[in-house]
Each structure stands twice: as C-alpha cells, then as structure tokens.
Image: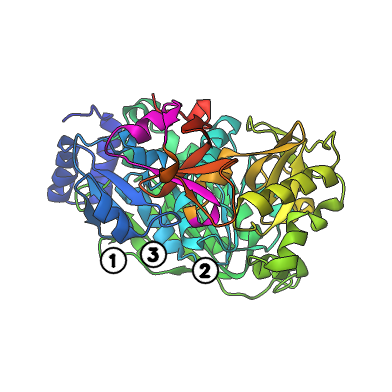
C-alpha cells in the first residue's frame, strides 16, 4: 500500500463496507495513483474548442460534461492555457457536487465553503455571467486564493466574502436559489491524494467535523429562498459526517426533502434511509471518495420571506444595459450613497474608504476609459474602495457590515487622473470587447515570454485595432485568442502589464 493508513480507519471502513470482498477492493485502490483532472472553463472557451487545441490527451469524466481526466505525469498547470484561465485543475470526483446543484444562468448562488474556488469557478461557468455568485470562506488566508482563482477564470458576477455562515444568513435571509455546502470534513476520501489529511486524522475527527457541519447546514437553510436547493458534499467516508449530518438536518427541517441521486450512473447509493444520497468510491470509479446530498425546500412555510423582494427582482433583471442606460450605469448613478464595506486588493477586509478624488471624479474617469477603450459596458453597481473600482452584481448597501474580500469584478483604479485597468478586467474580456487586441502563440515561446513579464517586439500588423481607434492605449493580450492580461504598444514594442504576482516562474 503506497499510503500508510491508520489501523482504526481501516477497521471502520471494514465495518462500513460490510463484505470482505468489497473491503479488499477498497484497500487495493490505495495501490493506484490518484487520478488527475481538469475542467474546461466555458466562461472563456467552449468544450469543443479546447479539445481541438489541447496539447494533452483528455478523456471524459462521466459525471461532468466539462471535466476530463489527464494522464499521469502531465502538468496542465505548466501550460500557457492555464494562465489564460482556459481550465481549472480539479480532482475528478470534486466536479460532481456542482453538477448536482444544477445551476441555471441568472440564479443567485451561494458557495458557503468556497476556497480555493474549484466549485465556485464551476458554478460561475454555469451562470454564464448572469445572476449572482457569492463565494465565502471562513478562513481569511484561504480567501486570497479564492479571489485570485475567480479573477483568473474571468468571473464578472462574483462577490467574495470572509464570513461566518450565520452572518451571511442574517444578511441574506431566504435569498439564494441554490446553495453549495462543500463542507469542512475529516477528508478521509482524500487520503490517497493528500498524506497530510492522514496525519491530521484521529478517531475523534469525524465527530468534531459533524458538529461544524450541523451549524453550517442551519445557516444555509436560513439563507435559502423558498423552493431552493442545497447541495451538501464532503470528501469523507465517515457516516457521522454524511448520512448522519443529513439525516439530522432532515429530521429538524421537514420542509426539505432528499432528492434521490444515489444509485444513478457512477453514483453509489448512500447508506440506510439516506440511499438517495450519492457516494463516489475510489474502488468503483476513477476518482477519490466523495459524498453528496441534494436537499430541496418545498417552498412552504416562510411567511417572513417574500417570494421575490424588489432587491432580488432588480438582481434578476440585471442584464447588460445598452446605450444611454449603459453610460449612466458606467457613471455609477446607483452608487452615490455613502458607506459600504469593501476591501483592498490585498484580500484583507476593510471598511470602504472614500476616494480622495471623490466618487464622481473616479466614475467619470472610468466612464471615459470604458467608452474609449472597450467596446462593452459592464452591467452592475459601481463600488469604490479608495480609488479602486469594482462592478458589483449587488448594490453596495447589501454588503454593509459583511467582511468583503471582493465586492465584485475589479475593473481598475484612478491614478494621476488616469484610469489604470485592473488585471481581472482583462481576464474576463474576450477580444471582441476590446478596441485593441493581440494574440500571442502558445507554441513558439512568445506567450511564455509575456507571462514572464518580458517586453516583446510586436510589429504593427499584428495588432488588431477596431476602425476609428488609435494605436495608443491598452491592448488586450491574448494567448491563441483567449485573454490573459494587458499590454501597451508603442513603436513596435509591447510594454508588459502582466502583474508581478501572477507571473510564470
Ligand atoms: C472542502 S474545502 C472547500 C473546497 C472548495 N469548495 C473548492 O472546491 O475549492 C472546505 C472549506 O471550508 C472552509 N471552512 C471551514 N469551516 C468553515 C465554516 N464554518 N464556514 C465556512 N467555511 C468554512 C475551509 O477554510 C475550507 O476552505
């Protein structure tokens, strides 16, 4: 056995699996190498296009139409496409819970335990830029990776919070259509992949996590809209944290039912009365151990929650405004109120500061930049933190009092009277949305040079410039046609604007 597993754990598994034959298959699965996978980011590229471009051999993962197995030894993180956000490297079984959440464009979705963002980026792809994604994690350090991943993957309608779930429920009672709880757990299902999880485990670990999961489930129930759906998932085998947590929740919340998914396709049934929950077993599928339960609210018994509040109705209506309305949104006419919380780019929560320049000035400089340099108007609510501007899917008042790591899509800042576009603005654009763009090849080393922060010699003919626009200004730099960052072109040279913290090493 490649991984040394605790004897008490193996004894528990023997009891859980019942037959000696099943247990032996389970134990033997630890001799296999863990499976690698990547999930195509359909916010940026359709599945067929990535498959046509892919330098790696990719094999479909049965439970996720955008997920593919990679071969042993392949390092997809060491390819320019990773830096263009074309795929997320994700353990195959971890792609299943969001498929069960069945997110539709335009919905309001909460990912309560979201860092580092694998499932949040998957949800964002399903929303296709419409509706709202709130991604939260309790641990401040972990929210940095979460925010960065959402930026790398070009998410425009995401908010990142660093909160206790009960405070989110208090701020958003009955608000979300779909909630994912990818719960903190004892991680037994990851033992083959991550030896640290083995070191942290002892026989008391499952009970400790079950208590935490109980609290998180309560908060999720309070934040769910009538008729909404919660998907609860763990990467552990322990009954206490799976069927146990769900059984206890269903007994205390009769308005919820367990939607049966266990026993279908690759999903094995849960144990006992929770057979409708789903398990992925490492000896039955090509992936690590997972548990999932789909919990649907029946829509009844919430007199205190309006079926659709005016705020929700506004969030639903948020589609790209055109013409004058878009200009008005770009000038931030909704954002003239005071207060609100946002955060600096460091990822630390902070009270939103007022711009020394004044909100109106920042928004006017931004509106000029957007009008002149981009062929699109991001819809949403401008939120200022100092001179840093975000476009939020929610009015900023809605985030008052919450530790907000990112109030929305970071579009840039005003410095010396000029608008400096943010890196996340670039990663979420497609070339048609920028008046100037340039595509670098992933094959001849120039994309890697750009990702390393080098200045590149680029002849004028290689720039794509929309009619009526000058050569001066920001260029959206793409890799094989997919946005990766900014550059500035002058006299045959491309000045590199790829941020230092993101560079290829
Ligand atoms: C299984 S991991 C989440 C993985 C993530 N969903 C993904 O796909 O990348 C569980 C996360 O829960 C967070 N966490 C732990 N306790 C929490 C709590 N009480 N509320 C919210 N998040 C919590 C941990 O910091 C950890 O990042």
Residue 238 place in picture, x, y as percent: 37, 45
- Residues at discs 2 and 3 in contact (Cβ within 8 Å): no
Q: Earlier in the sequence, mark 2 or mark 3?
A: 3
The Cα–Cα distance between marks 3 and 1, rounded to whole angstroms, is 13 Å
Q: Nearer the viewer, residue 319 or 32?
A: 319
Q: Earlier in the sequence, mark 3 or mark 1?
A: 1
Q: Quadrant of the N terminus?
A: top left
- Left or right of 432 in this view: 6: left
Residue 440, numbered label:
none
Q: Nearer the viewer, residue 84 or 179?
A: 84
Badge nearest the viewer, 2 or 3: 2
Residue 379 place in picture, x, y as percent: 66, 59
Q: Which residues are magenta?
A: 432-458
Residue 296, numbered label:
2
**What is the crowding at mark 1: few (fewer than 14 residues within 10 Å), some, or many (at least 20)?**
some
Q: Residue at x 77, y 70 (%)?
A: 310
Is 455 colored magenta in this rendering?
A: yes
């Amino acid at each position: 056995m490649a991984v040394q597993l605790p004897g008490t754990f193996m004894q528990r598994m023997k009891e859980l699996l019942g037959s000696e034959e099943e247990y032996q298959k389970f134990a033997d699965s630890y001799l296999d190498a863990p499976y690698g996978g990547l999930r195509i980011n359909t916010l940026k590229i359709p599945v067929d296009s990535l498959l046509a471009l892919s330098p790696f051999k990719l094999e479909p993962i049965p439970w996720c139409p955008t997920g593919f197995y990679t071969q042993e030894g392949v390092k997809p993180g060491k390819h320019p496409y990773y830096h263009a956000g074309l795929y997320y490297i994700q353990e195959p079984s971890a792609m299943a819970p969001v498929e069960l959440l069945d997110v539709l464009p335009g919905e309001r979705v909460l990912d309560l335990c979201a860092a580092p963002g694998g499932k949040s980026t998957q949800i964002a792809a399903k929303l296709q830029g419409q509706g709202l994604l709130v991604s939260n994690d309790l641990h401040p350090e972990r929210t940095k990776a979460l925010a960065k991943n959402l930026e790398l993957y070009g998410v425009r309608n995401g908010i990142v919070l660093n909160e206790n779930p009960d405070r989110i429920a208090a701020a958003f009672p009955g608000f979300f259509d779909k909630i994912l709880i990818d719960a903190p757990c004892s991680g037994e299902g990851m033992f083959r992949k991550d030896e640290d999880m083995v070191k942290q485990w002892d026989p008391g670990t499952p009970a400790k996590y079950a208590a935490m999961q109980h609290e998180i489930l309560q908060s999720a129930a309070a934040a769910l809209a009538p008729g909404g759906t919660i998907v609860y998932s763990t990467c552990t085998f322990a009954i206490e944290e799976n069927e146990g947590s769900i059984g206890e929740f269903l007994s205390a919340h009769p308005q919820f039912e367990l939607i049966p998914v266990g026993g279908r396709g690759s999903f094995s049934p849960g144990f006992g009365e929770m057979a409708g929950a789903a398990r992925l077993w490492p000896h039955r599928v090509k992936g690590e151990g997972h548990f999932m339960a789909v919990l649907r609210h029946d829509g009844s018994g919430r007199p205190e929650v309006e079926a659709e509040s005016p705020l929700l109705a506004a969030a639903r209506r948020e589609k790209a405004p055109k013409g004058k309305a878009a200009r008005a949104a770009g000038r931030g006419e909704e954002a003239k109120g005071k207060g609100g919380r946002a955060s600096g780019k460091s990822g630390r929560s902070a009270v939103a500061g007022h711009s020394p320049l004044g909100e109106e000035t920042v928004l006017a400089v931004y509106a000029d930049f957007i009008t002149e340099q981009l062929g699109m108007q991001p819809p949403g609510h401008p939120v200022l933190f100092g001179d840093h501007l975000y476009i939020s899917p929610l009015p900023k008042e809605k985030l008052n009092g919450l530790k907000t790591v990112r109030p929305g899509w970071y579009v840039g800042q005003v410095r010396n009277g000029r608008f400096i576009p943010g890196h996340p603005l670039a990663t979420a654009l497609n070339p048609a949305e920028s008046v100037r763009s340039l595509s670098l090849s992933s094959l001849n080393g120039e994309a890697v040079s750009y990702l390393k922060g080098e200045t590149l010699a680029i002849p004028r003919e290689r720039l794509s410039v929309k009619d009526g626009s000058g050569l001066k200004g920001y260029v959206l730099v793409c890799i094989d046609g997919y946005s990766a960052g900014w550059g500035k072109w002058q006299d045959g040279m491309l000045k590199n604007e790829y941020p230092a913290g993101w560079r290829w090493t």
